[in-house]
Amino acid sequence: MNIVMPSLGASVSEGKIVQWFKAVGDEVAAGEPLLEVESDKTSLEIEAPASGTLSEIRVAEDDIAPVGEIICILAGADEQPAETVEAPAPPPASPTAEPPSTEDVPGDPAPPPVRGRSQISPRARKLAAEKGIDLTQLADTGAPVTGADILAKSNAVPAADVSLMYADTPHQRHTISSMRGTIARRLTEAKQTIPHFYMSAEIDLGPLEQLRNELRSKVGECPTVTAFAIKALAEALRAVPEANVVWAGDSILQFERADIAVAVALDDGLLTPVIRDAGGKTPSSISAELKDLATRARQGRLQPADYEGGVASISNLGMHGVGRFQAIINPPQALILALGASERRPREADDGSVQFVSQMTVTLSADHRVVDGVTGANLLAAFGTRLQAPDGLL
C-alpha cells in the first residue's frame, strides 16, 4: 500500500516530515501513529490506514514532499512489498529504421558527482535545480542530502555577507522552521503586493470594563476583550457590507457572514485560527471557542478547517503593553484590526472639566484595491460604536 503526503489544507502544496515513529521492517497496526508531518500552518500525526509492515521510507525526516507524493510503502501481511513502478519501455524500433542519433537530441545532463554525499533525495535534487545550487559545493557531513539542506543553503545565500560581518561576534545560528519561512515569504509578499492604508480611532473602554466587572461579579468569569472585539467587528462588517470583501485577482468576493481570524502567537511564529460566523455567536461562546483554538494551535493540533479562510483578522497586543501598532494584512483577506492597550487618558467633559477615561487605540489596515477610505472609516466607526455599547453585543 502506497502512503502519500496528505493534503494539509487548500493553500498548502507540500509538507515536511518531522519524525518517523516507525523504521523500515517494523510492524504497524491500523490506527497507530506512523509519522508526524509539518506544514507552514500546523503539524499533524498521520496514522497508519491499515496493518502491515513498513517496507520502504521514501522521504526522510526533515525532507519536504509535495501533496500526493508517495512517502512510504506499507506491505500487508499477505502481500509482497510494493515495487517501484517503472516507466513503460519504448516500443521496439522498426527493422528498417535507423537508430536515432544522440548527438543532436537534447536531454538533461547527468547530475554532477557530489563529494562526500552518498545519497541525494529526489526532492533535494529538484530544489537544487530550481534554486541554482551546485550540489558539489555542499559541505561534507556524511549524511544524505535532503530538501531541508537545500532550503537552508538557499536561505543562507542572501545572508552570506551578514554572516561574515558578524563572524567575530559571538552568536548562535538557528535554522528557520517551515512556519517561520512561510510567514516571512507571505508577509513580504503582502507588503509588496497589497496597497495598505491605515486609519486609527480611540475607543472608550469604560462601558466595556464596567460590563465585564458586572459579569465577573455575577458569574465569576466574563468574555475577553478580544472576544467582544471579534463580535463587534463581525457586527460592523454586517453594517458595512461593502467592507466584507476580499480581492480575488480578477474579481471581488463579497460575503454574507463574517468569519474573523485571530492572531495567536506560537514559539516559532503565529497562526490565525478562524471564528466562523462570529456575528451569530455571543461573546461568551466566542471566548470559549477562541481559548480552545489557541490551545490546539500551540499544541500543533489545528486542522486546515480551523485556520483557512476568514474575511478579516484581529491582532491584540494590548495585553503586552503595546499602545498602538499597524498590522500587516493576512492575504487573501483585505482587513486587519490592531488592538492596543487600555490606557488612562485625559478628556475634556461637557462642563469643561478634565476627566480621565480608559481608552484603546485601534488601527485598521485595509487593502485599497477593494476597500476605499470612506468605507474603511465607516467600518471603524461602526466597530467603535458597537464596542462602546457592549450590552448590545450580548
Image: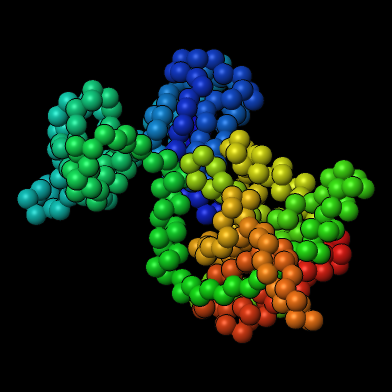
Indicate the position of residue 275 as horizontal and vertical percent values. Answer: 71, 55
The quadrant of the rendering that contains the C terminus is bottom right
Using the image, determine if residue 57 lies above or below residue 200. Answer: above
In the image, farthest residue toward the front: 353
Toward the bottom, the furthest residue is 374
Nearer-the-camera pick, 337 or 348: 348
The reply, left or right, for residue 139 in relation to residue 345 is left
Residue 338 lies in what quarter of the image?
A: bottom right
**Residue 138 visible at all:** yes
Comparing 256 with 184, the one in front is: 184
Q: In the picture provided, is 68 more to the left or to the right than 323?
A: left
Residue 52: x and y in percent read: 56, 19
Q: Which residue is drawn at 15% across and 53% down?
A: 106
Specify whether residue 79 is in view: no
Q: Position of residue 146 (x, y in %)?
A: 32, 34
The image position of residue 390, as x and y in percent, is: 82, 64
- Using the image as rendered, state which of residue 15 and residue 388 is in the foreground: 388
Q: Which colour scheme is used?
A: rainbow
Answer above or below: position of 91 versus 381.
Answer: above
Quadrant in the picture for residue 371:
bottom right
> Is residue 279 shown left or right of residue 157?
right
Which quadrant would residue 208 be assigned to in this image? Answer: bottom right
User: Would residue 237 be found to the left or right of residue 313 on screen?
Assistant: right
Q: Residue at x 19, y 45 (%)?
A: 165
Q: Along the line of sight, which residue is nearer the eye, 385 or 209?
A: 209
Work out whether 295 lies above or below 354. above
